[in-house]
């Protein structure tokens, strides 16, 4: 009886999670509000925090120069943070502003942004700031699309980031799938509903007035998520711009990739502990469902870990909970089919090629690798904010 109730409760919980995910997925299919493109007039400062990025920074700067946007309306500022390679030399070779920064006690992207924004406010008369990583390539119309959104009333815009070469390796293909599930289904769905969307570290665009008023005081391992939650509590919506596209070059080194994903997974727990009560309280006070949506974003684990939980639950039910074709059986069958359907819906909306579909064969190894690094960090209790 106890096992039956356990599987009934846990199965019902997973059904609620997938009902929420499919709600956002279907909302992402709603027609987008149309607006007229506006002539370029926003003056951008493109900020690139870089730590030992000599290998990638040159290609990123070249992609910016290739943008179809008047060069007199944007400036690139690279912050070479505690660099020990030729990052500064390469940046200067592209005739781009480079600000070296040396602070061994306060390293990491959040600390760089906290350091650079006050200087940018004093340095120039830019209308908006775009934060991109050193491994990010802009589509030619990226700045024009962001300009359109700002001119149509947006205060904060998040561009659509995608894996640049999903066909190069199973790791990149599976990362492409993760991007597709998040960007195409969840984030686009929120945008269609008029809710605030996610900030994603690269492709973040802020009007000057936002930075002037709120500054940048977030230095956790996931400074983008924390800043998004802070903005939401101040009534500022993040607009997800699926037409403003950027391409991300993933780390090919497994150790670097592990460090990056560890920051994403563990940092979310840290932000959750701080902001979850505040979001729930504000949701009840304002009677605004978007605050509960932001709370769900903090509660839900990364999708790969959700897959591990669901599949583990299915296996445990088959071994210990199956008692014939009853209510529990239909619940867990529905949970499994919902998981599979959601994955393929993400692949379809992203127009994935056959190599990405084939990479699903490696998904079990990827999922348990993600689980392993999370468990490892929990044991180590590592809260590093470094690169």
Image: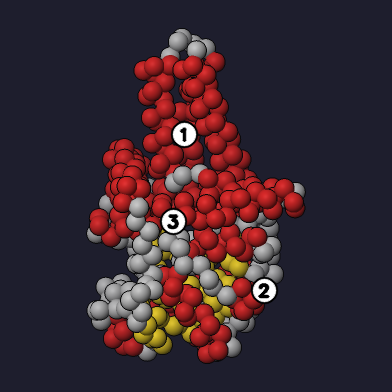
Picture coordinates of residue 371, whole percent (x, y): 34, 43
What secondary structure is found at the residue carrying circle 2? helix
Disc on res. 267: 3
Q: Point out the tag, 3 or 1, that comes first from the N-terminus.
A: 3
Disc on res. 151: 2
Picture coordinates of residue 337, whole percent (x, y): 47, 28
Residue furthest to the top in view is 324
Spatial distance from mark 2 to mark 1, Cα to Cα? 39 Å
- Judged by depth in the image, the label closer to the viewer, 3 or 1, is 3
Q: Is residue 138 visible?
A: no
Q: In which quarter of the image is the C terminus?
A: bottom left
* Up-down relation of residue 16 to residue 301 (above or below): above
* Up-down relation of residue 20 to residue 217 (above or below): above
What residue is rendered at 61% in x and 50% in y? Answer: 277
Spatial distance from mark 2 to mark 3, Cα to Cα? 33 Å
* Circles 3 and 1 in contact, beta carbons < 8 Å: no
Picture coordinates of residue 50, whole percent (x, y): 36, 75
């Amino acid at each position: 009886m106890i096992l039956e109730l356990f599987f009934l409760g846990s199965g019902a919980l997973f059904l609620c999670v997938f009902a929420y995910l499919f709600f956002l997925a279907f909302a992402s299919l709603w027609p987008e509000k149309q607006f007229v493109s506006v002539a370029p007039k926003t003056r951008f400062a493109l900020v690139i925090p870089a730590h030992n990025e000599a290998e990638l920074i040159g290609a990123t700067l070249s992609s910016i120069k290739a943008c179809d946007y008047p060069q007199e309306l944007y400036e690139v500022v690279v912050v070479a943070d505690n660099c020990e390679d030729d990052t500064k030399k390469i940046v200067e070779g592209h005739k781009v502003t480079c600000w070296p920064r040396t602070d061994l006690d306060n390293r990491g992207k959040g600390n760089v942004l906290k350091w650079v924004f006050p200087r940018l406010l004093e340095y120039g008369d830019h209308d908006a700031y775009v934060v991109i990583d050193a491994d990010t390539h802009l589509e030619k119309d990226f700045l024009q699309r962001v300009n359109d959104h700002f001119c149509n009333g947006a205060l904060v815009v998040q561009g659509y980031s995608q894996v640049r070469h999903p066909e190069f390796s199973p790791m990149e293909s599976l990362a492409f799938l993760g991007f597709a599930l998040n960007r195409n289904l969840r984030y686009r769905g929120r945008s269609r509903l008029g809710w605030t969307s996610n900030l994603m570290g690269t492709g973040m665009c802020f009007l000057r007035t936002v930075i002037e008023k709120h500054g940048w005081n977030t230095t956790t391992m996931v400074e983008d998520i924390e800043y998004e939650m802070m903005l939401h509590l101040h009534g500022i919506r993040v607009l997800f711009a699926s037409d403003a596209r950027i391409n991300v070059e993933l780390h090919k080194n497994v150790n670097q990739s592990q460090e990056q994903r560890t920051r994403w997974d563990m940092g979310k727990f840290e932000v959750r502990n701080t902001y979850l009560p505040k979001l729930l309280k504000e949701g009840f006070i304002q009677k605004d469902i978007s605050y509960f949506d932001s709370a769900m974003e903090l509660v839900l684990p990364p999708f790969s870990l959700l897959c591990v939980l669901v599949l583990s639950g299915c296996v445990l039910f088959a071994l210990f909970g199956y008692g014939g074709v009853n209510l529990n059986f239909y619940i867990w069958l529905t949970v499994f089919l919902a998981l599979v359907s959601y994955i393929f819906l993400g692949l379809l909306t992203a127009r994935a090629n056959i190599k990405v579909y084939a990479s699903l064969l490696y998904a079990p190894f990827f999922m348990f690798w993600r689980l392993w690094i999370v468990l490892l960090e929990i044991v180590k209790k590592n809260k590093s904010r470094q690169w």
